[in-house]
Image (spheres, rainbow, N blue to C red):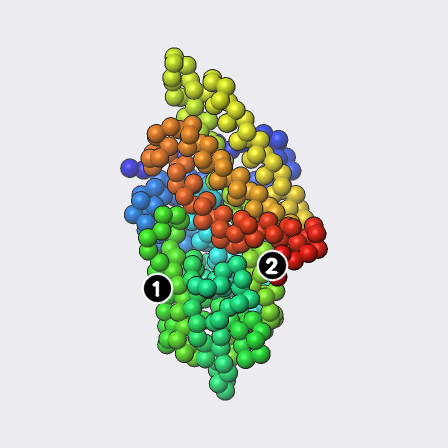
Amino acid sequence: MARTDQYQGHDYYQVDALLSEDHLLARDAVRDWVKREVSPIIEEYTERAECPMHLYKGLAEIGAYGPSLPAKYGGGGMDEIAYGVIMQELERGDSGVRSMASVQGSLVMYPIYKYGSEEHREKYLPKLGSGEMIGCFGLTEPDHGSNPSGMTTRYVEDGDHIILNGAKLWITSSPVADIAVVWAKGPDDRIRGVIVEKGMEGFSAPEIHGKWSLRASITGELVFEDVRIPKSHILPGVSGLKGPLSCLSKARYGIAWGAIGAALDCYDSALRYSLERTQFDKPIAQFQLTQKKLAEMITEITKAQLLAWRLGTLANDGKATPAQISMAKRNNVHMALEIAREARQIHGGMGITNEYPVMRHMMNLETVLTYEGTHDIHLLITGMDVTGLNAFK
């Protein structure tokens, strides 16, 4: 049964006044699309653990792929705050839907734009931006997650080609992707990005089943068995970990905004439910402990909104550091997960049903807490930044 989306935005500190008219127009357009296209179907797709494939095209139509990349290459030509508010509204609908957009824009289009040749940009970016082509990003391996420098995926040179071998794991969109931006070590042990196309012999992308989180997002592996690829598919503009890590910074920035959307949806549902649910002859919103929960929720959301906005202004000026992005990603995702748990309590037993979005957000956020850098790793990034000492070695 389709769920009616009654969501109303919450802006306790009038942060909207800090946004431009273009930001608000972009946000409202995406909010309307989520209410119309995502909310009525997302619970059913989640229950079936099925990806709503038609949303890939819909995300392109609302400009969710690479909003801050140049329009010339299929992006939106907007700024980083516009990218942030779009991710916020998408994750308000579902973390998996935001992941679809994040991967396409930040982890596939961005590295091709930033590090690819002009031929790469012209060949792939317009089709990725329009949703005609789906991409994925291959960095994480079965034995190398938080330590990507230890990757074992490698290629050797063979004339005008390379031969790629290895495997990647936990790859959003991989089973349905037309191309994969894969990070692998070359003969000199330097890490480089390689564009691998679907249909290349020896390349497969099996789906991962059995997930209790991000169930409406399709996830898989990337397997390379002597895949022969033209050397021209190597991204010429970067070598070393700087390449994939810069892409992750772009995606983590979007997550810092996106998690606020999930928190807002949980808060909105809990507030409305508490005003409607009566116990002991009064709405449960009138009880002190419920008010404590709601007051703490909106306080933490407000702090996260201000953190994301300031990070956005720094990003627009080219001053947002990877460590600052790590702080915002870690804080805001943890905040959203805690709010989902408190919101579940306010909903009581109804909170575990799909009549309300809270349990779905809670399950999704368990993944968001871990991917694009785990909660603990981001803490250590901040620790290294403030002390100058590396806890990873």
Q: Which residue is drawn at the image coordinates 34% and 64% (left, top)?
A: 206
SS type, badge 2: loop
Which numbered marker is on residue 165? none
- In this picture, residue 208 sits left or right of residue 254: left
* Residue depicted at x 48% and y 57%: 103
Q: Position of residue 66 (x, y in %)?
A: 53, 55
Position above or below: 162 against 210: below
Q: Quadrant of residue 301?
A: top right
Residue 85 is situated, as x and y percent measured from the top left of the image, at: 55, 44
Q: Amino acid at mark 2?
A: Phe
Which corner quadrant holds the C terminus? bottom right
The reply, left or right, for residue 50 in relation to residue 318 is left
Asked whether 63 or 332 is in front, the reply is 332
Q: Position of residue 292 (x, y in %)?
A: 52, 24
Of mark 1 and mark 2, the one earlier in the sequence is: 1
Crowd rating for badge 2 (residues with CA inside 10 Å; few <14, some 14–19, many 20+)? few
Q: Is residue 12 visible?
A: yes
Residue 73 shows in this picture: no
Q: Position of residue 334 (x, y in %)?
A: 52, 42
Dot 1 falls on a residue whose secondary structure is loop
The crowding category of the residue bearing disc 1, from other C-alpha atoms within 10 Å (few below 14, some 14 to 19, many at least 20), is some
- Nearer to the camera, 137 or 345: 345
To which quarter of the image does residue 276 belong? Answer: top left
Outermost residue, top direction? 281
The amino acid type, in three-letter code, at marker 1 is: Pro
Rendered image quadrant of residue 112: bottom right
* Quadrant of the snapshot with the N terminus: top left
| Residue at horizontal 53 percent and vertical 70 percent from the top | 193
Q: Which residue bears the numbered disc 2?
A: 392
Horizontal side of 227 relative to 49 (left or right) equals right
On screen, 73 above or below 316? Answer: below
Residue pointed to by mark 1: 206
